[in-house]
Amino acid sequence: MKPINLAEVQSELEKYINREVYLHLETTNGAYASHFNDKAYNVGAYIRNAKVTFNQAKIVGDGNSYRVGLKMELGWIYAEGLTDWEIYNSKLLLAGHDREGRLMVACQISDTPFS
């Protein structure tokens, strides 16, 4: 993966507008939190192969981390804390890693289901 380039990712996101696509979205601090602080809460969310159609897609950020918002007919999907991206097997992969390189958030969009 490479650091997010705002213009390149925005262009890739727009390719999926008004098309039924598959979405993978996950957030986690996993076991990372409890390794160093036994009072820390582990949190996470995970959804894979959700079929969605969005009519607007936008990436914003300050150069350190980014947020992607996908506007659907009845609401929004967003992922925050993204830092890296790539196109892999025709799938748009976005991820946010912490300073140690551990995955904290992933947002992936594809025309075909994720395996």
Image (cartoon, rainbow, N blue to C red):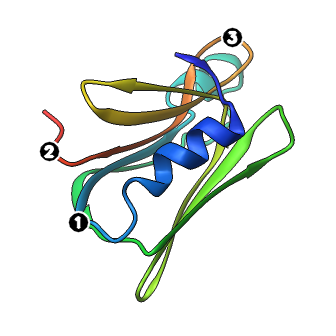
Farthest bottom residue in view: 74
Answer with left or right where residue 103 lies relative to residue 54.
Answer: right
Q: Quadrant of residue 51?
A: bottom left
In the foreground, 8 or 64: 8
Along the line of sight, the residue nearer the viewer: 107 or 41: 107
Q: Earlier in the sequence, mark 1 or mark 3?
A: 1
**Mark in the foreground, 1 or 3:** 1
Q: Is 65 left or right of 79, judged from the image as shown?
A: right
Residue 1, position in %: x, y?
52, 16
> What is the distance, in whole Å, between disc 1 and disc 3 at their CAs?
35 Å
- Residue 14, how many percent across, how many down? 48, 56
Question: Dot 1 surroundings within 10 Å: few (below 14), some, or many (20 or more)?
Answer: some
**Residue found at x 68% / y 31%:** 5
Residue 40 occupies quadrant: top right
Crowding around mark 3 (Cα neighbors within 10 Å: few <14, some 14 to 19, many 20+) is few
Q: CA distance from mark 2 to mark 3?
A: 30 Å
Numbered circles on residues, count: 3
Q: Secondary structure at mark 2?
A: loop
Amino acid type at mark 3:
Glu
Name the residue at 39% across, 37% down.
92
Q: Secondary structure at mark 1?
A: loop
Q: Secondary structure at mark 3?
A: loop
Label 2, label 1: how far apart the Cα atoms are: 11 Å
In the image: residue 20, left or right of residue 34? left
Residue type (three-letter) at the residue carrying disc 2: Pro
The image position of residue 111, as x and y in percent, is 21, 48
Question: Few, some or many C-alpha atoms within 10 Å of disc 2 (few <14, some 14-19, many ≥20)?
Answer: some
Indicate the amino acid at tag 1. Glu
Q: Residue at x 25, y 58 (%)?
A: 21
Determine which residue is flagged by label 1: 20
Which residue lies under the disc numbered 3? 100
Q: Which residue is mark 2?
A: 113
